[in-house]
Amino acid sequence: MSFRTSTQYVEDVSPGSGALPPRAWYASSDAKALCLGGSWRFRLSDTADAEDDSFAAPGYDAGGWAQVSVPGHWVLQGHGSPVYTNHLYPFPVDPPRVPTENPTGDHLRLFDLPGDWPEDGGTVLRFDGVESCARVWLNGTDLGEFKGSRLPHEFAVGHLLKPGGNVLAVRVHQWSAGSYLEDQDQWWLPGIFRDVTLLHRPAGGVLDFFVHASYDHTTGAGTLRVDSDVDGRVTVPDLGIDVAAGEPVTVPVEPWSAETPRLYDGVLATGGERVPLRIGFRTVALSDGLIRVNGRPVLFKGVNRHEWHPERGRALDLATMREDVLLMKRHNINAVRTSHYPPHPAFLGLCDELGLWVIDECDLETHGFTEQGWRDNPVDDDRWTPALLDRAARMVERDKNHPSVVIWSLGNEAGTGRGLTAMAEWIHGRDPSRLLHYEGDPGCRDTDVYSRMYADHAEVERIGRRLDGGTHKRRQLPFVLCEFGHAMGNGPGGLADYQQLFEAHERLQGGFVWEWIDHGIAHPELGYAYGGDFGEELHDGNFVCDGLLFPDRRPSPGLTEYKKVIEPVGISGDGTDGTVRVTNKYDFADLSALAFSWTYEVEGEVVDSGTLTVPALAPGASADLGLPEPPPGAPAGEALWTVRAVLAADTPWAPKDHVVAWGQIPAAQRRTPYVAAAARPVARDGVITLGPGVFDARTGALRAVGDVGVCGLRLDVWRATTDNDDGAAWQSGLRYGLLWRKLGLHRMRHRLDAVEVSEDALTVRTRVAPAARETALSAVYRWTSDGDRLRLAVATVPEGDWTVPLPRLGIRFGLPAADRVEWFGGGPGEAYPDTKAASAVGRWRSTVEDMQTPYVRPQENGARIEVRWAELGGLRVEGDPAFWLTARRWTTEQLDAATHRTDLLSGGTVWVNLDHGQHGIGSQSCGPAPLPRYHLKAEPAEFSFVFSVSATPTVSATPNAG
Ligand code: GAL
């Protein structure tokens, strides 16, 4: 036996050698399968050539080697470290060469065949994903090598197997020529990260097959034809179908859609094997310039999903995949782009079953070539075309039988070139039943959809109105925003404004928020690690944490916001005519799966409730429905109706009563607090008392309200800048986070100009300004009291030349203690001017702890909007007008300085911000800044608060989860 010691294949542009041609992937059949996951022997070398191949030979003693779990990434199992770069190649760009320092993991697995493993037929060994390049030996025989990390590769191995003591050896290289094609914005994580399976192939067993299941919406009939490389029969009992493979049959069916994912169970039986089929009848077409499924245009309410788990990286188990799909469905998401590679195949099965439109994207990105003006881009170099075609074929052949896949995507950020065109031509030829997507070609030469990322609202509107020009071909195409709403840190802002555009212009067929989940890596000291935390010499910091889910899959406020913005039922009313307007925003379903109810709430407390009868309403239809009379004897106070649409029965993705959509309709207006200036300020012993207020007579600083100590109350304009405030380095527009710091808004000084005591008021005059600047804000605090309550009126006027909006405008102060918080206003979660769709007016209870939003990189968070009154730390505050409430156990300065949540330590004091205004959030960490209407302009402002000692104690020893 001889081994090739050369590792030349690593730097070879070819996709590999020895693997079988790609074919349809299926999870189960009646043929035997053996999963080879589990603990494998593992040895890491620094270079591809460091060790010889002798480990692959039977009898090799690997007893001294480490062990790793397969599927898994060795860098997440204590061997080497992960590296994060967005688009920069973490090695010199010299395609197809890779560095000598090329971490190489030798993997060994010994296995016996189960006793009942059949002796006839053949066996294939399937790898579902190995990053980035592998060479495989079985029982000492070299099977070949492959690249294409997130694509399956099979080898015929039947002739090599023994009943016992089989030795499977896999050498995996972190870097290979393939790495040039896999420059996606994510962690570089080498390893055998998806399943390894031995599949028995019975004589006469299924080879490749292609399920064609179309739906004719004009007749209600579905046509099924299953093409198979091996003669066989196709049966679908529920449809009475029993035909030969290859033979078409047309029968009445219920169509498949993401909203109504009707699957029919069938079987493809060949001489040697029975493969279960899950058939969804649907027809995808481009007609009249629109993407239509079953004749109807669809509106994608999508997300971009990378595979991610904070401990296991891209080695996802089925439960995690299911959790992703359930979370998407429960948040009204109807589409997923598998950015930027084909996912684990089981994920697509879940999309078929639970209902999601899928853009299946090929494992291709060459973004790093942008650094050299795309020179030498493999996508425009014929030598690489076989590798590109191999990737296209491995995706299409693997996934072609999933009804959920409606669009193929060539890849992401790979420039343009002949290779892409070759892929597109091949895919169009092989599967004319689906459309083709690629974002990076403004001319849309190879695509069926005009796609962009991060276009701002104004441009999206122009595109919607067909005023954007472009090539003749592009002008005929429908539009999708394949990435928008960059969900990095606090945000994204502006989703509702995009959704309004999508709903207003038929050419705009929706978008996909970037992205689904933060790729934070669980870390013993840092909580979650991001780029740079492993000492990488090149990295892109926390740009890898830009998802709607936190790394532990807890929904972020961004996901809650998105759920509300894309809800499939519109519920609205202005309270003037006693009606509520209900609109069905589904594309296919009527409203019969939903039940509607109302509550009548006064000051946030439910006074009465009932059900609302809503007609089934066809997609697009609306109805104005009468609300009942307000309940007799309801208490006085601000009142509103909350109308909810909930699931009428359990579904596979959420239980009965799950809230799908809601709306609030005003019923009675708020009365703003009035405090008569009846009490007189009394100065004695260096202290001024005014009603319950106690002040320092020299500085006018508030020291206490009743027995509640207060410190540091003053005007505040600073917030710990968000990722979206800071903006991405490449942004050409103004980046306010930087401008604010340049202006010095994070280091404002407060000059005391006067403390004035009059008959009925204490007035404190200040000027608030940073060193080195002439810009300032005057702030006048006027205190009055009726004896029980203390009113603060703040008047502020900008001085000098303010060219930037303010981050925030309000007051802040410290309380010695607070844990429980109760308020009447927006909630339950945080909200900012352009992220407030999901904020519902109500009576909310939480704790200071729970009011913090755990952004992986700490930043401004947790504001509750439109708060009428709040109680915390023994204090009650009422606002005129309503205010933004934030409370935390650290200062804004500490929050600003922290790089990880573990930096945030309680300093004892609870810092409270009561804001009159906040600047919008936007999406400038990759997309547009907040729209001008969400800017907090520096202009004269007046606002007031009424403080009193709260009637119910809000400080308790044990925090109340609320
Ligand atoms: C896009 C890219 C994504 C991601 C995103 C920013 O340009 O396609 O992969 O990098 O920007 O998070």
Image (spheres, helix red, strand yellow):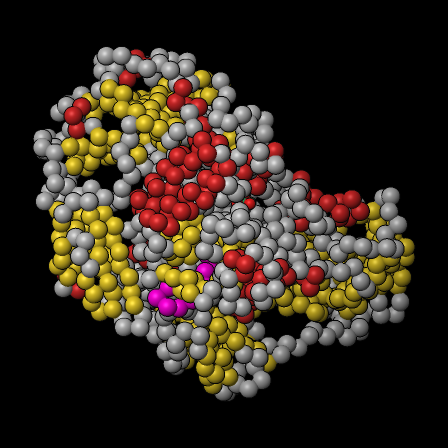
Taking depth in this image into account, of 659 and 567 the one nearest to the observer is 567
* Of the pair 934 and 235, the residue shown nearer to us: 235
440 on left or right of 30:
right
* Image quadrant in which you'd find residue 702: bottom right
Eyeballing the image, is 622 above or below 228? below
Q: Is residue 568 visible?
A: no
User: From what the image shows, is residue 55 above or below residue 748?
Assistant: above
Q: Is residue 823 left or right of residue 114?
A: right
Apparent side of residue 398 relative to residue 368 in the rendered image (left or right): left
Q: Which residue range is magenta in the image?
A: 293-307
Residue drawn at x 86%, y 47% as measured from the top left: 773
Question: Quadrant location of ligand 1?
Answer: top right
Q: Quadrant of the N terminus?
A: top left
Q: Residue at x 70, y 44 (%)?
A: 893
Residue 904 in percent (x, y) is at 60, 41
Position of 35 relative to 824 (above/below): above
Identify the residue at image location x=55%, y=27%: 93
**Label tally:** 0
State yes or no: residue 541 in magenta: no
Location of residue 33 (image quadrant): top left
Front residue (pair 2, 109): 2
| Image location (x, y in percent) of residue 629 | 49, 87
Counting from the top left corner in percent of width and height, residue 314 is at 41, 38
Q: Is residue 199 visible?
A: yes
Residue 21, by quadrant, is top left
Residue at horizontal 31 percent and vertical 73 percent from the top: 218
